[in-house]
Amino acid sequence: MIAGLLGLVVAAAFAGAASGNVTITSNGSNPTLNIALTGTGVTAGTLSANPTSLSFGSVQVGSNTIIATMTPSGGTAQTLPVVFFNNLDPNDLLPADTTITLRVNMTNAVGTDAHTFDPTVDSVYVNGIPSFLNWDAGTLAAYQLTNNPVGSGIYTLDLLLAKGSPVQQTYKYGINGNDDEAGAGNNHVRYVRSTGTYVMPLDTFGNPLVEASFGNLKASPSTAAHVLISWLGRPGVHLQTKSSLTGSWTDHPETDSLSSTNWPSSGGPTFFRLIKQ
């Protein structure tokens, strides 16, 4: 005879004690088996917050914490998960001051207002870093890009992102300070993938691109004794390995913020994955 497992799911329809039974029929010597069931439905509790609203005030980026007391009333004990302001956990923030270089190709650029970019008279601005401002040349004066190299269609701007700034940056370009690159809400979304200094990939005006946060893990030949492991990296993401499909993963925090590493190819199989912790 082969043993088996029976799984039951119970959904309480009301509070209080309840009973019932389950009947199993088979071709065994006891063709009908009755199993008695009992249980107690518990009313879900409620939560009240004290205070009922929170104000962070004016604080340095990434430095403030506010405590609110959540009091359960009735029902069973409540366990609340850890939450972060704006859903940004510490691994979504830059661990150090970082200067990024924005780059956009303005060759044959045409705004949504049908204005064709003229490099002899027009200027290029970026909006959204660190937050979106009013669309006009005066407000965006500090966010004007310069032609670099001169005479090319490429415009660049260096911006300092303070420690604690989001790794994900959302932004948009405009001709002469106008919101004319793309429709409302159609923005560039890119990730700062290393700290200290980071040159953003080249953007194309009128073609907002949304990057993946991380991934694209792959292996390719490197040397006779190594395999090149590459991926789309960023701060807060690193490799884990293990030697079989069973067992626990081994952390490699030294790969945080990297996008590749040469891995020894000897010593049996190795499995890789990326993790954001």
Image (cartoon, rainbow, N blue to C red):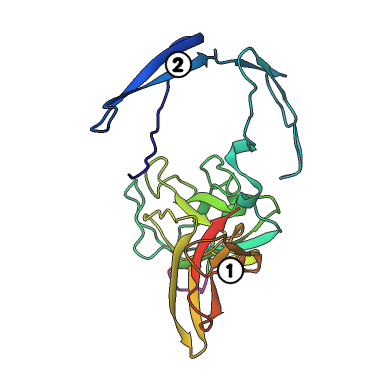
Picture quadrant of residue 2: top left
What type of secondary structure mainly makes up the magenta span?
loop
Q: Which one is nearer the viewer's eye here, 134 or 213? A: 213
Q: Residues within 10 Å of mark 1 (few under 14, many from 20)?
A: some
Residue 87 place in picture, x, y as percent: 58, 39
Q: Which one is nearer the viewer's eye here, 102 or 113? A: 102
| Label 1 sits on residue | 258
Element on which disc 1 rests: loop
Farthest front residue? Answer: 29
Residue 191 disc label:
none
Residue 153 place in picture, x, y as percent: 43, 69
Q: Residue at x 40, y 58 (%)?
A: 205
Q: Is residue 187 above or below residue 195?
A: above
Instruction: Point out the image quarter for the N terminus.
Output: top left
Residue 122 visible in rendering: yes
Residue 181 place in picture, x, y as percent: 40, 50
| Label 2 sits on residue | 12
Residue 120 visible in rendering: no
What kind of residue is marked 2?
Ala
Q: Which one is nearer the viewer's eye here, 16 or 251? A: 16
On screen, residue 3 versus residue 255, left or right, reads left
Q: Is residue 180 above or below residue 124?
A: above
Q: Which residues are magenta?
A: 148-153
Q: Is residue 210 magenta?
A: no
Element on which disc 2 rests: loop
Q: Residues within 10 Å of mark 2 (few under 14, many from 20)?
A: some
